[in-house]
Amino acid sequence: PSRARGMTKGDGGPTHVINTAPLPREDVRNVQRDARAFGKSRIAFRDLQFCIPGRTAAAPARVILTPTSGVVECGEMVAIMGPSGCGKTTLLDMVAAKKTTAYDGEVFFNGLPRDDLFARLTSYVPQQDLLPAHITVYEAVKFVHELRVEANMSPDEREAAVMDVLRLLGLDSIRDELIGDASVRGISGGQKRRVTLARGLAGGSQIVFADEPTSGLSSTDAETVVRAMAVASARTGVAFVTVIHQPRAEVMDLYHSLILLTSSPGRVVYNGAYEAAAAYFAAAGSPVPSRGNPADFFLDVITPGAHGERSNFFAQRYVELQRDGVEKRVEASLALPKLTPLDVLRETAVIQGLVASDVHATRIAANFTKQLKVLMERTLTITKRNRVGLRLRFGVSIAQGVVVGLAFFDIASKPVVSQISFFFMLLQMGTIANMSVMPELIGTRLLLKNEEADALYSTGASIVVQSSVNNTLAVTGNFITCLLMFAFSQLSWSKFGTLYAWSLLNFLSVTNYLRCIAAIAPNAALSVQTAMPGLLFFILFNNFFVNKATAPVFIKWAIYISPMAWAIEQIVCGIYGFNADLVAFYGYDASTSRTVTALGVLLGEMIFFQCLEVILLKRSNSIVR
């Protein structure tokens, strides 16, 4: 089992990383292909182009990238470079099937158009590392392996497979370190980037797409990351296609091919072997200075507006000298024997010593039960290790229970109307305190959206797990608050069951409403503003201050929607149903049929909001590229 380091036993505070050993500086040219190398795929793209439509029908479209073609061979390291606005990331996203807006052109995987299995055979490394802070390096990679590899492996076999990937990227010495973040100290930025790459390789990706994998890293860390990719490519046959920005010479020497773009609009100025690029530019009258960095020099020459730039010249030179050759390479790639994604998955399984028949033609490798199991294990691990968050959550619950309980101390000795005020406050505390669930949900939403886009699990599985864990924590905190408030009230404990049962139903209904808000709100701050109208509606039409006996006819319908209204009516009728005058005063109904109706309404609202959350999570705040 993995042993998390980076947190002191019994304390939620961060500690220093124990081991940050760099990846050994290995000469990639001497790296031999591994006997179990599983990379066997190529990708070809033809006439990919992207335009942004004009704001009006008469306005011209803005061209981001003109028609671009190319080929990525098995085990190749490909760099995409160019000035800002040239369409580097646009090209990467189109080839990687991550572009969410419409574009033109064709992409072929092993000679065939991409299908739903393409997501299982590729991985995408965004600029920002999206990893949970409270899991270890080993756990982060094992998570992907469990969801991507369809095989009945023993724990020892799975650990051995994950450790092979960690050793390949020089991460085996830090396997038990926490990933960390701004508040939990963990591994370095360069190591996080390698962990993200390891997650792609652990899932058996044939091609890894990386958007500026060296962004934000020191020059040394940047070289370490690219060298790790190069070593992995050489040993496994996996191709790496990366957008890279201002690499130093040692980094660029690790690449096989270069796609160089200029801007205004995005056009190809060079597409070929990196080692031939300097001669290509020299032949056009732009030799690389003897002591200069070739990559920097290329960018200077093809950046519009730069001193001495020749972007238009080289764009035209590409059309005249290289474009036909690139198109012929695309045609040659398409003429090679075809290999379906399912064939690749099954051949990869056999190479790794697994059973080919275990692989199924589904976009998500793991079945729903496996998704729930793996997601639940990770979520519980994160929850247990986030001790600061647990202390804060339950500390606030205790504080609320004590403070409000003292405000209603010995309310049992007061008139019944005052006791009903206490019931209302208990329901309201649950409603308002519930808002703390939204920042948590929004904080994890981006990670979940990215992992769902990578076909690791379904939206339904993530909702089931997140709802189960978050609702359990929320209900536990609410129970503590209710218990303390009731203890201070000195009401008879025989009344607690009725009070808490209806309070819980109201709490869960409001919780699911707030989960819907968290699904559509762009950030935590706006989520509070978005949720407030609904919460005020529930609280205002509570069937106590505004009740059926006093509400105007034209607004009385609102009481039948508010979960608080149903809950407080059933609490009062359940505890004081014998008091006919009190029930009549508020316009309540103490009949059994009314109780059944209230139960149905509250359960119905819970289910409605839960289903609405599923729809909103699928359709809202999707990653737009």
Image: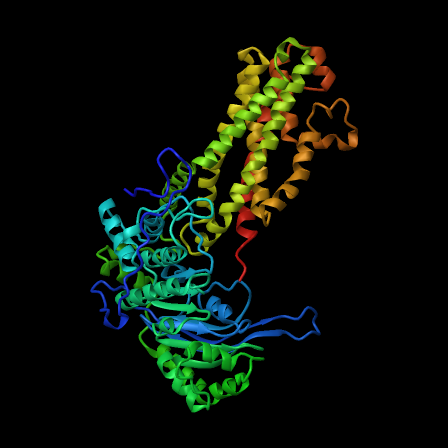
User: Residue 104, position in %: x, y?
Assistant: 52, 72
The N terminus, quarter of image = top left
Quick one: 395 or 483, which is closer to the camera? 395
Up-down: is 166 above or below 78? above
User: Residue 508, position in %: x, y?
Assistant: 55, 32
User: Residue 125, position in %: x, y?
Assistant: 42, 60
Left or right: where does residue 209 sit relative to residue 421?
A: left
Up-down: is 284 above or below 275? below
Image point 70% across, 23% down: which residue?
544
Can residue 591 be seen here? no
Can residue 225 be seen here? yes
Quick one: 486 or 18, which is closer to the camera? 18
* Color style of the picture: rainbow
Up-down: is 216 above or below 409? below
Image point 55% across, 82% down: which residue?
307
Quick one: 321 or 288, which is closer to the camera? 288
The image quarter in which residue 573 lies: top right
Quick one: 239 or 277, which is closer to the camera? 277
